[in-house]
């Protein structure tokens, strides 16, 4: 026995001889021996002297030794109690062990070494227990603090975000309102044939139409301020007594006024103008300026010419995009129609390219419409510069452009143009201080291969653009007929999947899991397959997302759980050693209201013990709404089932975060294992996942182990379990039994 260091040992025994002999023995070992001759004296000594260990006789003169024991375990659970019992009290000793005694010795104690050993062990264990409790308390405290801290931080962020969002929205709304108002005004005055201008209360011209600009007697620089009287004649004086100011009149009456004034033009010719001036009001009823329209009364000779001019301008307006001045959708369709007719006659092809700027919305939202608009203008220009004069570049809407390539003899040429467009847009676009980068997704369709009508051809280009975006943007795609087939197939699949469940087309394959060191079979994962009557075996990756989206995953998931649990139980009934069964849960299943009930009922129904079921969840599932998930997982864990994180390393959770969850196993994702021997980064990630997981008392399984080298490295890193083609592929239940038979 190690020296007692004055540790206090209380001996409760009514036999004086026993007491004194034990006490002497203890003192010789540097312990302090305390003695009590009955139960009550013993309990008094417990409370007063706080002994490090108690030696307790069960037969006491006053109260039952078992009651003394119960009181000690209740009041001082860390104090180890070793029973010293007479030969006839074996039953009581066992009862005492059940009640919390740590050990027992049988009287008479002939060998002091036996006593020494029992005391030494008990003290050592008590120390360990205390340490473990301290450690756990620290850990709990840490987790509590960290959770509170994270929650606080997340609340702060949420608040800050909300405030910011409101501010940004207000500003954007205000900006948009101004923008809209200006646009409306501009459209109105642009539609007027005669010169027109908007003038502020301090006589400055703040807006004018094209006709007014054409009439301007001077070359206007951007920075020049133009005053109302300078229009539309040559440097006339401001209004005076004999030429009253229209604005004064309006201010007096609040109504529109008409007056005739004479001006000189650039060539010094005199013109009579009829000016109509109307007030413009603010929302609050105050005046903000006025609108002036000038009608030349002198050259009535050119009325007809003007009318023609007006018509052509209207045509231009309705066929062009006002921002970029490119043809709009209407004109695009007209021209496409024309070119298709021409192509039919001359037996050549026409290609259309639809362009959708990638992430243009972001630029518009973050930097404002003005920046966005200037970018669109620049992009329009670059597109025009890239193409031949005879090609059409149109702006279809917001951030969509479209191109017609006429007279195509070789479709390969279209690819060349698409690449040229990508190149032209690759160089940054400078708007003010901003250096902006943009890329575009391009969808291409060709007349007459893909369609012989405008509508159809445009739809094909649209489908192709969709595919280009799917492929990760900044790329171009030619339309192919299977693009439509794919969309159609997706629709078919949904109704097919509904039937699959009823008609028993779903099957479960099982993939074995092994202990890494001794290659013992320890478990299996249930992996779903769809045995399609025409298409053959369909992998879960091809239909589970659809099942998630449509909600079909709930009945399907239930079926998988029930079938696999029943299968596992059936193998146990056939006498195979019990192993654990892993079942994947998708996000929607896990969120489902009755998941707890479902698992409990399934276990009850099939008779499978909970410890042989493991539920696999991915990181993103558990990290989404942590608070609620901790509760669900704790409840599941309380049922006795095992919990595993699947595909670990692909999500965004940190291991320390996982401490919050009652997880038992971690499955390292296949993607790290694949290159573990060639990519030092992957090897390091795997190694740290393993080390940290062990630190948290989790077991680690490596997924997707395909060769011996991967196995050896993982083994070296201390990985516990393995699942992969090297050991066994997923197989139907009938074939799986061979893994039981082969297991050592
Ligand atoms: P998972 O849970 O990560 O399953 C492991 C996948 O890795 C399986 O693909 C398995 O066949 C494959 N695998 C195992 N070892 C190797 C290997 O050595 N090399 C390679 N290349 N692959 C290996 P599977 O069966 O196609 O399943 C794909 C995913 O579909 C599963 O990934 C799981 O997320 C999901 N899934 C499968 N069955 C179900 C199910 O019943 N319910 C739900 N919700 N999801 C399921
Ligand atoms: Mg899995
Ligand atoms: Mg996995």
Image (cartoon, grey):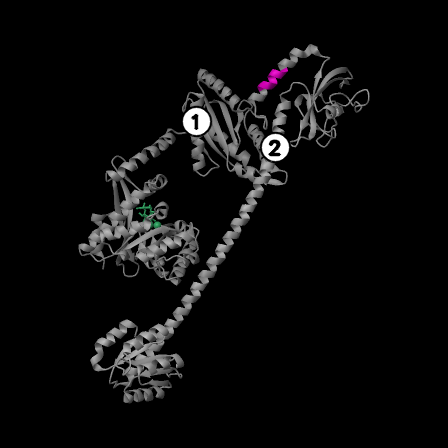
Q: Classify 710 as above or below 404.
A: below
Q: Is residue 538 magenta?
A: no
Q: Is residue 310 magenta?
A: yes
Q: Crowding near pointer 2: few (<14 within 10 Å), some, many (20+)?
A: few
Q: Classify 671 as above or below 44.
A: above
Is residue 350 or residue 170 the one in the foreground?
A: 170
Farthest-out residue, left: 574
Is residue 582 or residue 259 the one in the foreground?
A: 259
Span colored in magenta: 309-315
Count of all numbered marks drawn on residues in the image: 2
Q: Position of residue 304 (x, y in %)?
A: 65, 11
Q: Is residue 636 left or right of residue 477?
A: left
Q: Give the prevailing secondary structure in the magenta stretch.
A: helix
Farthest-out residue, right: 241
Residue identified by numbered label 2: 179
Q: Nearer the viewer, mark 1 or mark 2?
A: 2
Write the residue at 56% across / 28% down: 384
Is residue 384 or residue 306 the one in the foreground?
A: 306
Q: Determine if the C-beta at disc 1 is less than 8 A from ligand 1.
A: no
Residue 198 visible within the image: no
Q: Is residue 319 left or right of residue 96?
A: right
Residue 133 visible within the image: yes
Q: Are marks 1 and 2 in contact (CB under 8 Å)?
A: no
Q: Crowding near pointer 1: few (<14 within 10 Å), some, many (20+)?
A: some
Q: Classify 56 as above or below 413.
A: below
Residue identified by numbered label 1: 459
Question: Quadrant location of residue 633?
Answer: bottom left
Precedes in sequence: disc 1 or disc 2 = 2
Write the residue at 77% across / 23% down: 245
Q: Position of residue 617 (x, y in %)?
A: 36, 51
């Amino acid at each position: 026995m190690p020296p007692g260091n004055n540790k206090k040992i209380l001996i409760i025994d009514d036999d004086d001889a026993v007491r004194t002999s034990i006490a002497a023995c203890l003192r010789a070992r540097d312990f302090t021996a305390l003695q009590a001759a009955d139960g009550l004296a013993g309990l008094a000594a417990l409370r007063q002297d706080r002994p490090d260990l108690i030696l307790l006789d069960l037969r006491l003169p006053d109260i039952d030794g078992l009651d003394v024991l119960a009181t000690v375990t209740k009041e001082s659970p860390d104090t180890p109690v070793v029973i010293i019992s007479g030969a006839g009290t074996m039953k009581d000793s066992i009862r005492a062990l059940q009640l919390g005694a740590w050990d027992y010795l049988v009287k008479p104690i002939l060998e002091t070494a036996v006593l020494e050993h029992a005391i030494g062990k008990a003290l050592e264990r008590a120390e360990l227990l205390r340490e473990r409790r301290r450690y756990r308390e620290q850990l709990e405290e840490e987790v509590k603090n960290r959770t509170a801290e994270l929650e606080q931080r997340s609340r702060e962020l949420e608040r800050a975000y909300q405030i910011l969002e409101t501010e940004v929205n207000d500003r954007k709304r205000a900006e948009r309102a101004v923008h809209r108002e200006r646009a409306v005004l501009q459209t109105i005055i642009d539609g007027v044939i005669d010169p027109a201008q908007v003038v502020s209360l301090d006589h400055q011209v703040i807006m004018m139409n094209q006709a007014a600009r054409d009439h301007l007697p001077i070359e206007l620089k951007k920075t020049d301020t133009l005053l109302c009287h300078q229009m539309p004649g040559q440097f006339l004086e401001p209004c005076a007594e004999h030429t009253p100011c229209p604005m004064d009149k309006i201010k007096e009456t609040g109504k529109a006024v008409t007056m005739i004034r004479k001006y000189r033009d650039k060539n010094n010719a005199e013109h009579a103008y009829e000016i109509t001036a109307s007030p413009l009001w603010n929302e609050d009823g105050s005046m903000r300026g006025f609108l002036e329209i000038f009608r030349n009364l002198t050259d009535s000779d050119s009325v007809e010419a003007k009318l023609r001019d007006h018509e052509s301008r209207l045509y231009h307006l309705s066929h062009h995009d006002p921002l970029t001045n490119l043809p709009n959708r209407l004109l695009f369709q007209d021209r496409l129609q024309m070119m298709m007719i021409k192509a039919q006659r001359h037996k050549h092809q026409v290609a259309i390219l639809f362009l959708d700027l990638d992430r243009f919305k972001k630029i518009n939202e973050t930097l404002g419409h003005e920046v966005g608009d200037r970018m669109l203008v620049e992009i329009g220009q670059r597109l025009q510069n890239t193409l031949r004069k005879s090609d059409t570049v149109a702006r279809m809407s917001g951030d969509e452009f479209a191109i017609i390539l006429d007279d195509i003899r070789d479709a390969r040429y279209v690819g060349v143009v698409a690449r040229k467009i990508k190149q032209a847009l690759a160089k940054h676009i400078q708007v003010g201080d901003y250096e902006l980068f943009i890329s575009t997704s391009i969808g291409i369709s060709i007349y007459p291969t893909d369609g012989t009508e405008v509508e159809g051809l445009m739809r094909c280009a649209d489908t192709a653009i969709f595919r280009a975006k799917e492929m990760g943007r900044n790329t171009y795609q030619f339309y192919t007929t299977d693009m439509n087939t794919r969309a159609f197939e997706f629709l078919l699949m949904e109704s097919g999947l509904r039937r699959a469940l009823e008609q028993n087309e779903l099957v479960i394959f099982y993939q074995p899991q092994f202990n890494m060191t001794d290659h013992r079979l320890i478990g299996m994962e249930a992996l779903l397959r769809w045995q399609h009557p025409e298409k053959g075996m369909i992998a879960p990756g091809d239909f589970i997302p659809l099942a998630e989206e449509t909600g079909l995953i709930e009945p399907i998931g239930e079926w998988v759980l029930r079938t696999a649990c029943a299968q596992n139980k059936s193998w146990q009934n056939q006498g195979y050693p019990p192993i654990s069964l892993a079942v994947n849960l998708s996000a929607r299943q896990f969120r489902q209201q009755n998941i707890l009930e479902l698992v409990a009922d399934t276990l009850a129904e099939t008779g499978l013990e909970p410890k042989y079921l493991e539920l696999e969840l991915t990181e993103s599932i558990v990290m989404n709404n942590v608070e609620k998930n901790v509760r669900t997982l704790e409840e599941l864990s309380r049922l006795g089932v095992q919990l595993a994180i699947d595909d670990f390393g692909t999500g965004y959770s940190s291991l320390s975060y996982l401490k919050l969850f009652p997880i038992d196993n971690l499955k390292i994702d296949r993607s790290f294992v694949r290159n573990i021997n060639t990519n030092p980064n992957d090897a390091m990630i795997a190694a740290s996942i393993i080390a940290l997981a062990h630190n948290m008392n989790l077991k680690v399984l490596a997924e997707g182990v395909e060769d011996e080298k991967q196995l050896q490295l993982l083994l070296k890193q201390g990985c516990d379990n393995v699942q992969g083609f090297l050991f066994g592929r997923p197989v139907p239940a009938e074939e799986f039994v061979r893994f039981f038979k082969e297991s050592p």
